[in-house]
C-alpha cells in the first residue's frame, strides 16, 4: 500500500483533508481511493474499471454510466448519509459483518501508517 495524506489546509476540522491510497487486493490488482475536502466543486464519484466493463457512478449529478449506456437517477445530496445512519441504527439489513468492519479498520490504520511514513515513492 502507498498512501499520501494529512491536514494541509486551514480548514478547521480534526481530520485529514486529503488522502490518496494506492493498493492491491486479491480481487483487484490496482485500486485507488481518493478523499479530498479541498475541492470547491462538489464531486462524489465511484469508478470501477474491469476487463470487460467500466462503471462510473456520479452521485453529485445523478448519473450512472455502464460502458456507453447512461442512466439518470435521483439522489438528494444528503440521502446517502441518511441511509447510512438508518442502517447503522438497525433500520436496514445492509450492515457490514464484524469481519468486514475489522478489515476496514485495518485498512484505515494501514493507510494512516503508510501516509505517516510517506510510503509513496517520495525522494
Image (tube, rainbow, N blue to C red):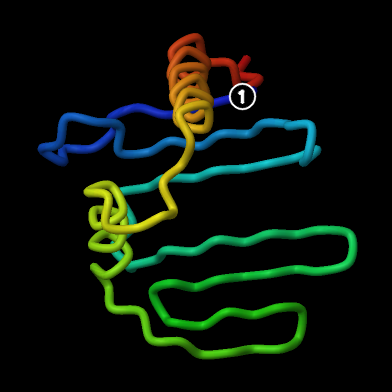
Compared to 11, does 4 lie above or below? above
Residue 62 place in picture, x, y as percent = 44, 82
Q: Is residue 36 above or below residue 69?
A: above
**Residue 39, quarter of picture:** bottom left
Q: Residue at x 62, y 70 (%)?
A: 56
Q: Position of residue 70 (x, y in %)?
A: 64, 89
Query: Quick one: quadrant of the C terminus?
Result: top right
SS for tag 1? strand
Residue in view at x 49 percent, y 19 percent: 106
Within the image, what quadrant is residue 41 found in?
A: bottom left
Against 67, residue 5 (above or below) is above
Nearer to the camera, 73 or 6: 73
Q: Residues within 10 Å of mark 1 (few under 14, many from 20)?
A: some
Residue at (28%, 30%) from the top-left corner? 7
* Relative image position of residue 77 (x, y in whole percent): 27, 72
Q: Which residue is mark 1?
A: 2
Amino acid at each position: 500500500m502507498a498512501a499520501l495524506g494529512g491536514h494541509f489546509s486551514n480548514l478547521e476540522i480534526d481530520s485529514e483533508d486529503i488522502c490518496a491510497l494506492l493498493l492491491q487486493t486479491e480481487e483487484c490488482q490496482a485500486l485507488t481511493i481518493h478523499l479530498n475536502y479541498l475541492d470547491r466543486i462538489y464531486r462524489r464519484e465511484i469508478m470501477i474499471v474491469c476487463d470487460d466493463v467500466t462503471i462510473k457512478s456520479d452521485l453529485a449529478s445523478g448519473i450512472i454510466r455502464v460502458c456507453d449506456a447512461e442512466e439518470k437517477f435521483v439522489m438528494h445530496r444528503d440521502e446517502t448519509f441518511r441511509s447510512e445512519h438508518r442502517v447503522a441504527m438497525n433500520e436496514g439489513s445492509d450492515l457490514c459483518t464484524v469481519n468486514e468492519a475489522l478489515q476496514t479498520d485495518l485498512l484505515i490504520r494501514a493507510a494512516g501508517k503508510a501516509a505517516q511514513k510517506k510510503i509513496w515513492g517520495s525522494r
